[in-house]
Amino acid sequence: MDFDLYDLSDDQLPEDLNGFLTYLNTIKGKSINTINAYKWDLTMFFKFMKLYKGLVPKSTNFDEIIINDIDSQFIKKIKLMDLYAFISFAENFRSNGNYAKARKVSALKSFFKFLHGKAKIISDNPAIELETPKLDKRNPVYLTLNESKSLLAATKESDSQRDFCIITLFLNCGLRLSELCSIDIPNIKTDTLTIIGKGNKERTVYLNNACIRSIESYLPVRNKEQHRIIDKNALFISNRFTRINKRTVEIMVKKYIKKAGLDPEKYTPHKLRHTAATLMYKYGQVDIRSLQKILGHENISTTQIYTHVDDETLRKAVNSNPLSD
């Protein structure tokens, strides 16, 4: 697959950070993407701390600051105000918005909770009172029904059964990009697809007629070069006969978005996931709990963003008021 697996023996990181990342991987079962995000944020934090505490010259290139010499004694001295100083640094010198800052707060809170509660390395948790920046509610960006049809039509014109199948699955199933790339043929059973989603959780995706037809049309094309395919189980194959990677899909989606006369900078594979969820909620009479299961959301609050997108229904409801005239 196209992501980098977490190296459990990363000698460029502090020992306690390695321990935390290993815990996330082996005990908590977090996804590689989540582990790498925590690794990135906490690496930045420790580089900042060395600079903030005057342990390296101010002229030092930030990205070149070495942090594998940070030990438990250093970590025990970290205070709440140090954490706020880091969040301020992320905003003012790394141009982080509230969502990026919130992710860093989450990483810090999880790390110090582990050091205090699990590893017993610190006696006091400095992050316990660390507050998360207030996040404004954002409605999801998605394609309308007509725009979705235009995208499908533009993809079909290309005569690429693979690309048409990918766009069809995105728009009908609400898959994450990583989930689509990881689809294995043996996991497709008639009208169901078993995938490993976020947090390494297995879920069943139900395939409608459009998805089934697109897969059936694509498989014979794929199998023409069966002898050259490296990953025999992978559904979607690249031009190099390896499992397709996320970057290839991103580029492909942008190409067809542009071909359909839409903004390629506005719509990404994740926006197609939003589109599938919105169309199911708006036109399929799908209740929010069912939509949660379809999308593989751990918390219902994540799914509830789709209850705010149907402005036309709200407009009709207001206009139906007998006093509207």
Image (tube, helix red, strand yellow):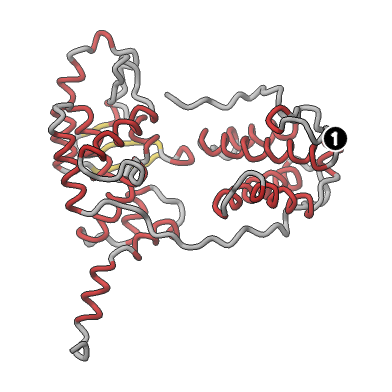
Left or right for 120, reference 310: right
Residue 72, image x, y percentages: 82, 36
| 315, 175: nearer the viewer | 315
Q: Is residue 150 above or below residue 240?
A: below
* Quadrant location of the C terminus in the rendered image: bottom left
Left or right for 26, reference 153: right
Q: Which residue is mark 1?
A: 55
Residue 260, image x, y percentages: 20, 41
> In the image, what residue occupies the spot 67% across and 39% down?
42
The amino acid pointed to by label 1 is Leu
Residue 105, image x, y percentages: 64, 51
Residue 248, image x, y percentages: 35, 27
Left or right for 111, reference 50: left
> In the image, what residue occupies the spot 19% across and 17% down?
223
Dot 1, how many residues are within 10 Å of its Cα: few (below 14), some (14-19), or many (20+)?
few
* Quadrant location of the N terminus in the rendered image: top left
| 321, 96: nearer the viewer | 96
Q: Is residue 185 above or below residue 190?
A: above
Q: Quadrant of residue 36?
A: top right
Left or right for 116, reference 133: right
SS class, disc 1:
loop
